[in-house]
Image (tube, helix red, strand yellow):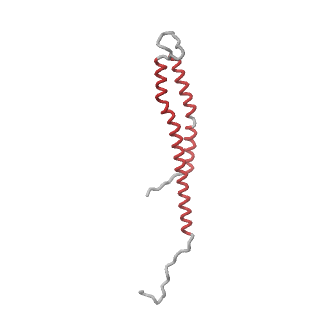
């Protein structure tokens, strides 16, 4: 049987740091979206010196939009996966601690009943 040996407080510390880092996804996604929009706007059109008409992006802007559209679900997946992983690790740690407490309670419970002593043989019962 395998043996678990984890430092619960260390796990909780790592989970806290991971949660803090994962909490920064929203800001990172905002910066990413803004950078894509700025790049698309700066890319201009195919005609030298022409300003893009409203709603008519140039080829680079169109490519950036297509890239953003195709990677949107991948980006949404990151914080969802991180949250689920953090919650799973926290639950596993909780179960680990609960399991230890249950084992200790079971051991204490098993120690409560009076011990069962074997019958004592009379001195004259040698060989019987």
Q: Is residue 126 above or below residue 97?
A: below
Residue pushed farthest bottom? Answer: 124
Q: Is residue 98 above or below residue 116?
A: above
Please name whichever residue, 111 or 8, is drawn nearer the observer in this view of the structure.
111
Residue at left 46%, top 17%? 59
Residue at left 50%, top 36%? 77
Is 94 left or right of 46, judged from the image as shown?
right
Please name whichever residue, 88 or 14, is drawn nearer the observer in this view of the structure.
88
Q: Where is residue 103 drawn, in percent x and y?
A: 53, 61
Q: Where is residue 127 drawn, in percent x and y?
A: 41, 87
Q: Where is residue 124 drawn, in percent x and y?
A: 46, 90
Q: Where is residue 65 drawn, in percent x and y?
A: 49, 23
Residue pushed farthest top? Answer: 49
Snapshot quadrant of residue 23? top right
**Which quadrant holds the C terminus?**
bottom left
Residue at left 54%, top 30%? 29
Residue pushed farthest front? Answer: 55
Please name whichever residue, 124 or 48, is drawn nearer the observer in this view of the structure.
48
Residue at left 51%, top 34%? 76
């Amino acid at each position: 049987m395998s043996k678990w040996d984890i430092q619960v407080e260390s796990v909780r510390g790592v989970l806290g740091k991971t949660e803090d880092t994962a909490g920064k996804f929203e800001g990172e996604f905002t910066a990413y979206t803004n950078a894509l929009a700025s790049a698309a706007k700066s890319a201009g059109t195919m005609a030298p010196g022409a300003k893009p008409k409203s709603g008519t992006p140039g080829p680079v802007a169109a490519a950036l939009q297509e890239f953003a559209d195709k990677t949107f679900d991948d980006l949404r997946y990151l914080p969802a996966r991180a949250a689920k992983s953090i919650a799973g690790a926290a639950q596993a740690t909780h179960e680990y601690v609960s399991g230890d407490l249950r084992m200790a309670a079971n051991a204490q419970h098993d120690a409560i009943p009076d011990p069962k002593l074997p019958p004592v043989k009379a001195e004259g019962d040698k060989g019987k």
